[in-house]
Amino acid sequence: MRKYDAVVIGAGPGGYVAAIRLAQYGQKVALVEKETVGGVCLNVGCIPSKALINASEIFRSFTTASAMGLEVAGAKVDVKKLQSWKNDVVKKLTGGIAILLKASKIDLLKGEARFVSNREIAVDKEEIRFDNAIVATGSRPAVLKGFEPDGKFVGTSTEGLGYENIPKELCVIGGGYIGLEIGSLYASFGSQVTVVEATDSLLPGTDPDLVRVVQKELKKRGVKIHLKSQALSWKGAKGRAEVHVASENGEQVIPADKILVAVGRVPNTQNIGLEALGVALDQKGFIKIDHQLKTNVDGIFAIGDCAGGALLAHKASKEGVVAAGVIAGKKMTYDVRAMPAVIFTTPEIAYVGLSEAEAKMAGHTVKVGKFPFMASGKALAIGETEGFVKIISDAGTERILGVAIVGYDASHLIGEACLAIEMGACAEDIALTVHPHPTLSESFSEAAEAIHGTAIHLFTR
């Protein structure tokens, strides 16, 4: 029977990071993965979706560049070549991880793991002993009753990122970030996209100021949006599908070549022996953990999507680093002030810290500084003027409580905000920091100035 200091179950962005960090601490490590290293994120999530989103925006620019005097005729999408390129991107990254694991002398065990005890797992038929184990089994798309994937019309994000043809009509069930990201990219490729959302807003829980900008752009691209609507059923009809939807205006029928179900994700915590071990789960099946990523069972840790909270790859990676440190005897806890979130719609949304509403609910008297990209020289120069940077600060201390950005490249701009909040910066710190010109990052310092009504490129009384 093989024996390890630590075993990590799941080689996604939480698991492989934890394994490498454990190896850096001198631990003998086994990493168990039943499919491909990289997990959902690298294989059928973050990376392939962003690759396709980028490609779709390049394609769309062919039709919008005429305003700059650039005429592009006859542009078309070679879907087979596009998917091949996307798959090559994924292979390069997963191949790189495999090299890192080998260089770190981590044993990669292919197969399904199941706990025998809190010191032993079975990987297929082999039993492995360990001192500590990290569960990093991730999550999977939630299935909507009556809309189970059928291999032809209905699918989840996994199928949506692998379509062999650009659907003429795409019905997206769920107006959250996954549905809108994938829906947006196919709208850019020319699909007629219809979004069906059960609540009264797209991107439920996101600052309405940000959502309005995205919703405006979606409508400009011809995306049809049905709020407070419920997908009831679907049926095949003449080689296509018909989705029956209940809304405030009565029942409607939405034609579609493809139906994308994006109604959330559920944890992969079943059938790995956690229940028999006595590991505590919450009502939704997520593993309960403490500030050191420990479960209630000695020697068992959990990180990433399977442990709940925000289902973000970078959160999983951070938790992996902390869990590895705790196992190696380091004095570490999961203590993150600034956990960013990014929604890769067009335009992008990115935010970190407290929203304006959350800050007020927490008892803060807030001051808000807002700077629109319409007033940015760089945004005008590149033709990306939709959106803004918003800084939420405490009126008394001027401490930055949160930052919200909607607009081009928001995913890159949010990094400075993360550092500012983590370091306890005040709005004045940002305002006094010289930002390069002409860049979109200047909008961050202008928003900080706007808190005091002193933004140079924004007239205020």
Image: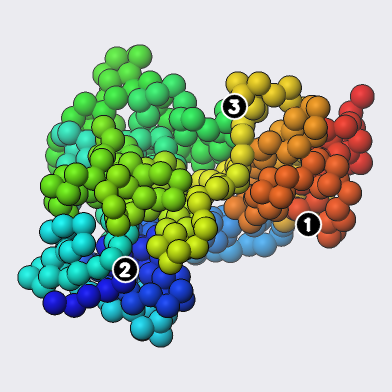
Q: Is residue 449 above or below residue 15?
A: above
Measuring from the top left, give residue 192's x and y in whole percent. 39, 42
Query: Can you identify the residue that label 3 sits on?
Result: 358
Query: Can you identify the residue that label 2 sits on?
Result: 6
**Residue at the left extreme, as displayed:** 125
Mark 2 vs mark 1: give the one in front: 2
Name the residue located 35 percent from the left edge and 14 percent from the top edge.
248
Q: Nearer the viewer, residue 72 or 21?
A: 21
Classify the position of the C terminus by image quarter. top right
Mark 3 vs mark 2: give the one in front: 2
Q: Which one is earlier in the sequence, the residue at label 3 or at label 1?
A: 3
Q: Nearer the viewer, residue 311 or 247?
A: 311
Q: CA distance from mark 3 to mark 1?
A: 30 Å
Q: Does residue 256 appear to the left or right of 206 in the view shown?
A: left
Q: Amino acid at mark 2?
A: Ala
Q: Nearer the viewer, residue 434 or 330?
A: 330
Q: CA distance from mark 2 to mark 1?
A: 46 Å
Q: CA distance from mark 3 to mark 2?
A: 39 Å
Q: Which one is earlier in the sequence, the residue at label 3 or at label 2?
A: 2
Q: Does residue 213 appear to the left or right of 187 in the view shown?
A: right
Q: Quadrant of residue 117?
A: bottom left
Q: Quadrant of residue 319?
A: bottom left
Name the residue located 84 percent from the left edge and 35 percent from the top edge.
450
Name the residue located 28 percent from the left edge and 35 percent from the top edge.
282
Q: Quadrant of residue 123?
A: bottom left
Q: Nearer the viewer, residue 26 or 71?
A: 26
Measuring from the top left, give residue 78's x and y in whole percent. 38, 67
Q: Which one is earlier in the sequence, the residue at label 2 or at label 1?
A: 2
Query: Can you identify the residue that label 1 sits on?
Result: 439
Q: Secondary structure at mark 3?
A: helix
Q: Is residue 267 above or below residue 113?
A: above
